[in-house]
Image (cartoon, coloured by chain):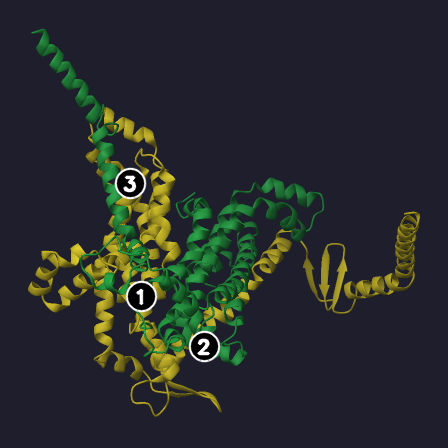
Chain colours: A yellow, B green
Amino acid sequence: MKKMKLFFKRLFQFFTHGFVRFGEFWQAKIQPPLDRITYVLRHNFIYREEGNIIYFFHILKIKVTRKRRHALYGYLFISSWLIGISFFTLYPLFYSLYLSFHEAYYNLQDGITTTYIGFNNYINILRSQILIPLYTNYLGRMVVAVPIIIVFSIIIAVLVNAPIKSKSLWRTVFFLPVIISTGPVINELNAQSAITLPNLQASGIYSYLANNLPAFLADPLTTVINSMLIILWYAGIPILIYLAGLQKIDPSLYEAASMDGASPWMRFWKITLPSLMPFTGISIVYVVVSMSLFVEPAGLLDLTRTHMLVGAPDSAFWFGYGYAAAMAWIYFILMVLLILLFTRITKEKPVRIQ
Amino acid sequence: MKLLNISVARQQKLRKIWLGKNLTDGLAYRLVIYLLLISFSYIYLYPLLFMVVNSLKSVDDLINPGVQWIPTALIWENYERAFQVLNLPQSIIDSTGYVLRVSVAATLSSALIGYGFARFDFPFKKLFFAIMLATFILPQQVTMVANMIIYRELNIISSESAMLYPALTGQGINAAIYILIFYTFYKTIPGILIESAEVDGAGQLRIFRSIILPLAIPSFVIVFLFSFVWYWNESFITGLYVGDKITLPLWLQAFRSSYESIFPPGTPGAELNEAILLAGNMLTILPLLLLYFFSQKLFTQSIDRTGITGE
């Protein structure tokens, strides 16, 4: 026991002694040169600090103000983003635009080889028998599905916001798909046709639509019916957006309206819906983007990947990077057009007071 | 006369119970709402129920149209096989490690970037902010063609870095949303708190570390959870940049081929059926389901924090 105590005492002494010695050494030998270096760094020909003025090369004089310091710190904080946006977003964006006007292939020896072919990639896509139906299907499906999702999410948000028990349970249920919807799972469910209600497919509406409408109208409708449940799964986040919007409505509005004898039905159309309209724009953007990003097997995005990866100069079917880039660009343009179209339709019209 | 009065009173009472004073507090209204909610959630959860039930069915039950919701016997062997095919204990550890690294990187970087946007004024701030928001609309698929080439030149293709570098620089999946969450939160911190620290002589990094970070922990948790879920679920970009069989969904994508290599066709009782596939699905979504049930409040209240509802 005594030995142990002694041992620890020795150990402690050794460390304190060591620290003191190290401190002395630092003070004597290392600190002065460090000071010298910092002084030289701050007072040299190129950069000199005097008070709150900084000189560059004795000519360029910069007065350090609070505003300027803040601007510098702002740039420092977002510097990682500035690097990222230029390397991983803007440069690839313009590079893929550049590629889309070229015939581009990759091989191990010379890397990427490009030859300028003008608008030929785009023209070839517009001529393609395989791609055009895919693009029109995409457009048709979105035009049918997005309004369904928006209406559905408004209905669910209003229902969940009603005075009911265990609100958080319902919220949990309706947000669940956002957590579990991943590409492979949905594709597997799709393969087993579990993404629509069996009754819906067997009902008269389905066969009526398929038999009586021209193909360009019937196809989007039937594909939407065939994947109804997955389409509704995209409503997860819009429901939350609308719920947050509903909580912002002043309850006294409803009281005043019911005093004046408005029925719940009227109150929904005259108060609830108009106050939810501002949130429709952001919901539409979210829905269109997340639906467009879903990759279905043998869909457009999947084909883009195939063209890119399989592409070889002598291939008769796969046309390399330039073709893939042009496909992606047309897709993106269609997506932006859809967003513009929907937001234009749902835009609030200024109310005229007479 | 008296009898009639009583019946009228009773009728009125009944009416009040059913319809309430102004319809919304009556019993009928509530019944209708519950009915609608239950039927909608049945529609909503139908694929999930289908997965749970069908993954436990035997081959006979799958074919038999009389058996829809209640299987005649629970075949746990489906899960055992899917467990083997998905290479489960190992693959889940691998994908959790990968997703953790990437989502932590995304969270930290968006915290810093959001602070830069929220706290400081600098030239071109509005332009940069608009570009940042616009990156949300820009699909990865437009840039992926060029990104493939760039990553190849940087020599980070087919490695985790291909996802890690964009995440570190605020360009990962849905990064605009994370930055927006942090931005909105930082805007709610009173400026006087930070100014007083500045007067006391704290540098900006020190202010960020000892004042902002402790306050922002809820935002950190939310952003981390979201990025974890989204990076876990992203299979197209991950498969393209990082490679096959990195995350559990990618193992699921290769389910059929890896099933054939483990249970070669021809051996008796080894045919792949739908039930086994669905068991694989269930096993894939199970980790996230567990995560969700422990943290669902954070997820469902998150939208209020993004500030897209306008403050």
Judged from the image, the secondary structure of the residue bearing numbered disc 1 is helix
Residue A248 placement, left or right of A156 = right
Query: N-terminal of the two: label 1 or label 3?
Result: 3
Q: How crowded is mark 2: few (under 14 residues within 10 Å), some or many (20 or more)?
A: many
Where on the picture, by quarter, is residue B193? top right
Measured in 3D between alpha carbons, the distance from the residue under mark 2 to the one under mark 3, in whole angstroms, is 44 Å
Label 3 is placed on what type of residue? Val
Q: Residue at x 65, y 53 (%)?
A: B205
User: Mark 2 = which residue?
Assistant: B148
Judged from the image, the secondary structure of the residue bearing numbered disc 2 is helix
Q: Which residue is drawn at 77% across and 63% down?
A: A42
Q: Give the chain of mark 1.
A: A
Q: Where is residue A178 in the image (x, y as percent from the top left)?
A: 37, 54
B27 versus B5 height, above or below: below
Label 1 is placed on what type of residue? Glu
Label 2 is placed on what type of residue? Met
Residue A31 placement, left or right of B219 = right
Q: Which mark is residue A188?
A: 1
